[in-house]
Each structure stands twice: as C-alpha cells, then as structure tokens.
Image (cartoon, rainbow, N blue to C red):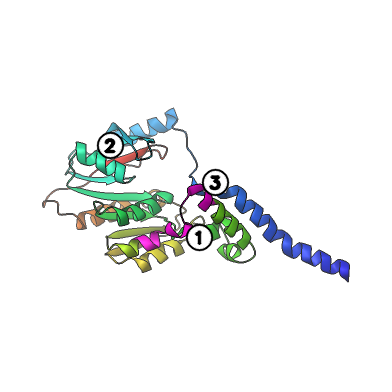
Amino acid sequence: MRRLIRIALILLLFPPLLAAVAGWLSGPAFLHPIRRELTPDLIREAEASFVITGTSPEDFEVRAPDRALLLGWKVRPKIPNGNWVLHDTSAIIDALESSEHPKHIFALGESMGAGIVLQSAAADRRIEAVVAEASFANLREAAYDYAGLRKYPWLGKTLFAPGTWTLLYRDQKLAGFPVAEVSPVKAVASRAFPVLLICDEQDVALPCRHSEMIYAAARGPKQLWVVPRAFHTAALGFQPEEFRRRVLSFFAAHSSAAPGQTTSMPSMAPRARQSVVSS
C-alpha cells in the first residue's frame, strides 16, 4: 500500500515539477519572437510583391530610445494620400513626422506585434486607429496557452500551473517591469481609439478568446472579424481580398481624407524587417 501511495504521489507531483522547470527555461523565448534571417530569397519575394502592387520601398533607419537601430522600409503606393500605416511605435512616428508630415497615422500588427500596437495606441495619441490580428489579451493569459502546450490552456491553469508561475516570474525579472502591465486588454480600456480585431478560427497559438477579451474591454469604435479555417496570423493568406477590403475601409472610416482619394495595401514585407506603409 505504501509503495502504491509513493507511486501515486510521484505521478501526481512529477508533471507540475517538470512544468515549473520548463517554464523557467522557456521564459526568455516567451519574451522574444523568433529571429528570422533576411535571406536573398525573402528580399526577392518582397521586391516581387512591390512590383505586383506598384509600390516603391525606401530604406528607413530609426534609432530607438534605447539606442537600438531599427531597419526597415518606407513603402509608397503609386498615388499616396499622406496617410501612413506602421508596424512599430513612437520612434517610428517621430521619424515619420520629421520627414513625411503624415496626415494620419494608423497601426497594423499581428501576434506579438498586434499586442504592441494596441498598447502603443493607448500611450501615443498620434496613432488614430489600430488593426490587430491574433493579439494576446495579456501575458498571463498567453502563458496559459504556452504552458498548456498551445492546445489545452486549461492545463496551464491547473496541472501545469507551476510552469505558468515560473515563466511569468522569470520574465518579470528579465524584463524589469510588472507582468500585469503587459496587457492589450488594459490598453483598449484606457483610451477609446478605434480598433479592428482579427482572429483566426484555427489559431492554437493565440486562440480567438484573446481577441474576444480585447473586444469586450475596448471603449472606442470596434470590430471583430473571425476568419474561417485560418491559422495563426494567416488571415491575409486565406482571404486576401476580404482582408484588404476590411482593413482599408476601416482606416478610411477613421480618417478625414478628401473625397475621391483611394488607398492601397501592398503585400506584407518579410517579417525580419519592419515596414511602414504609406496609404
């Protein structure tokens, strides 16, 4: 009987202990997206998309407040109307204002980038509207999915909860800021800016419940588009025409561009390089 009890205790305690170790070890990876090398093939792919869409890229370098050098492109359509859509935050806006004098500034991001632009719009009123695909609701909620093997978030809240605790604790120590403050849900509740939330129906990395939580908390004009059959950040690939229609009409609805001006959206540039798109 004692032996059976010991075996039962081991079986009961081993998964949480293993999860705690795994959470501690995976903490740094949870904070940082996977770095993707900008290969010649990706550059050729981007150049082809610029030709197809009739846009022209310019090299764009911005020094962030922490002195990190941000490299990217400014992408212009054939007939620009003075509006700009960015994939980064305040340092990019400062650089655009000094060089382009934009009429309107919007933000578009996906996954971690979606969470960043939502929080940036809460902090920087120059961002007038946001499109966010597959954002996380907050770091704790995302950690539940991460600890639950990206399939069973309830495991991250129950049996594998120690993995969630150690992951968040280590990330807080590494980043030097409270985990609770990393929250797009809080961001949309703090400032009433327009937001179009896109969630991918088959997303297991950041399921639709994240976008639904953000949508429920948002105080400004808001839309939620669930893309059937799409997986993580794949809305544009699954429904390219509908994606362009929804995004462009959303931005147009929240700008005061003169009647007759049109907007265009080129294909996304490789993710290893940030891009700022003129509309």
The amino acid beneath tag 1 is: Arg
Q: Is residue 275 above or below residue 112?
A: above
Quadrant (top left, top right, bottom left, bottom right) of the N terminus: bottom right
Whether 178 is among the magenta residues is yes
Q: Position of residue 132 (x, y in %)?
A: 36, 55
Provide the residue span drawn in magenta.
171-187
Tag in front: 3 or 2: 3
- The answer to whether residue 202 is visible is no
Q: Is residue 232 above or below residue 210?
A: above
- Residue with the mark numbered 2: 74
Cβ atoms at labels 2 and 1 below 8 Å apart:
no
Q: Residue at 41% of width from left, 62% of height from top? A: 211
Q: Position of residue 274 (x, y in %)?
A: 36, 39
Whether 125 is among the magenta residues is no
Write down the quadrant of residue 192 in the picture: bottom left
For mark 3, give the secondary structure: helix
Q: Residue at 33% of width from left, 42% of height from top? A: 267
The disc placed on residue 140 is 1
Q: Residues within 10 Å of mark 2 (few under 14, many from 20)?
A: many
The disc placed on residue 28 is 3
Q: Earlier in the sequence, mark 1 or mark 3?
A: 3
The disc placed on residue 236 is none
The amino acid beneath tag 3 is: Pro
Q: Residues within 10 Å of mark 1 (few under 14, many from 20)?
A: many
For mark 1, give the secondary structure: helix
Q: Position of residue 223 (x, y in %)?
A: 31, 63
**How many numbered callouts?**
3
The amino acid beneath tag 2 is: Lys
Q: Residue at 53% of width from left, 57% of height from top? A: 143
